Image (tube, rainbow, N blue to C red):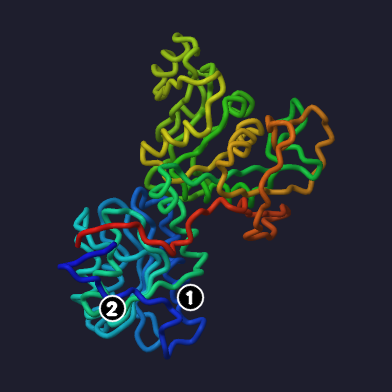
Amino acid sequence: MWRRRGRRPPPVQRLSQWRGLGPLQPLDFLNAAAASGREWLGRTSPRPAVGAVVVRDGQIIGQSATAPGTGPHAEAQALEQAGALARGADLYTTLEPCRHHGQTPPCTEAIVAAGIGRCFYAYPDPNPAATGGAHELAAAGVETARVAGCDAAFDGLKGYLHHTRTGRPWVIAKWAMSLDGRVALPAGQRGYLSSPQSLSLVHRRRAEVDAIVVGSGTVLADDPRLTVRAGIAVNRQPLRVVLDGRARLPADAAMLGMPGKTICFVGAAAPPERCAALVESGCFVQIQDDPPRADPNAVLQRLGAMGVQSVLLEGGPTTIGSFLAAQLINEIEVFLCPVLVGDPASPVALRGLPEGFLSPGLELLESGTVGPDLWLRARPRGSIDWDGETQPERTGA
């Protein structure tokens, strides 16, 4: 229960209580705010990529996103753009404005000082240190409401929301496959199944996450660099994570010569000399007291403790299968390529699933063509256990 000087604060209203707003207008402005935040996804972590717009008389007069590093939050920058016109205007933000002193002053103070009349937000902040901003604004006389159903806002915040609530990163599994279900070319042939356009999209996804996870089989077969390329500017490369129970990662693997960090999860029985060679090559070695194959849940818990909020799981088939069997995949992106491999020895998309395994149903989020490839984005039903309706319990101001 919330308490402030012995009194309950004014309630944060639901959108249905408002009058004088067209039914699509709030979502339109929240989608504009979400678009601003999404442009910075992956560059603000561990802070969420929040977007905000200031609206007056139906026109956007300020629009911004949270800056990387210790820069100002989205709300503060949008208010600065709006200037004196912000007084009496509406603020739309993808995340509930913060009320605490962190790397920047509280956004609630800036909103009240600017004279904002109404504040709409898409998701309450599950962080106990930051939540409560909506109630602070309501107590200060700013009419405040949550607008539910802004999928674009969730897409920009999903890593932060999921990590804050569960301690684990949001996991996106990605693979490309042929029309006959193969994920690699026939033996002896090197190259990609997917088109250059699909590869560019994958590099965009890499730029948006904190870490890329692969199994040792993928590294041994392909020697990937696992970096963001394709002309995409980033302020840091995502953490590279290799699940390698027997420490088979070569000390001269291409990824170890790339900018950024690589961490290798090995089993307790991994040869000490192999672990020492990896450390000598600049790889961080994390020893797990597990069976030879890394436990997906333990890996995610460890990455979450390191502050990793989002992961792109790039393979191979056995690694993706183990995460799927453990029901730890939150989202799936598949590129279906118009080729037939025809080689029965080429690996199929998923391996290692237990006998009789039946995955939960998938909710198709998006589909389309990327170059000649068919692109699908889906989410396992039940992978989101929170819709933002329930505020965390908290006492105090």
Q: Residue 333 appears at what percent x and percent y?
A: 62, 49
Residue 112 in the figure: left or right of residue 276: left
C-beta proximity under 8 Å, tags 2 and 1: no
Q: Quadrant of the N terminus?
A: bottom left
Out of 2 and 66, give the one closest to the viewer.
2
- Residue at 36% x, 36% y: name it: 306
Residue 297 in the figure: left or right of residue 191: left
Q: Amino acid at mark 1?
A: Leu
Which of the 4 image quarters holds residue 388? bottom left
Q: Secondary structure at mark 2?
A: helix
Out of 378 and 224, give the one closest to the viewer.
378
Compared to residue 315, the image places residue 160 above or below, namely below
Q: Quadrant of the C terminus?
A: bottom left
Question: Which of disc 1 and disc 2 is earlier in sequence?
Answer: 1
Q: How many marks?
A: 2
Compared to residue 256, the image places residue 112 above or below, namely below
Q: Which is closer to the viewer, label 2 or label 1?
A: 1
Q: Residue 300 appears at what percent x and percent y?
A: 47, 36
Residue 35 in the figure: left or right of residue 145: right
Out of 95 and 46, give the one closest to the viewer.
95
Residue 321 in the figure: left or right of residue 17: right
The residues bearing labels 2 and 1 have C-alpha atoms spaced at a distance of 20 Å
Which residue in the protein does label 2 denote? 82
- Residue at 36% x, 72% y: name it: 63
Q: Residue 93 appears at what percent x and percent y?
A: 37, 69
Q: Amino acid at mark 2?
A: Ala
Q: Secondary structure at mark 1?
A: helix
Q: Residue 196 appears at what percent x and percent y?
A: 64, 48
- Residue at 43% x, 43% y: name it: 210
Which residue in the protein does label 1 denote? 27
Other-residue count near label 1 (Cα within 10 Å), few / some / many at <14 / 14–19 / ≥20: many
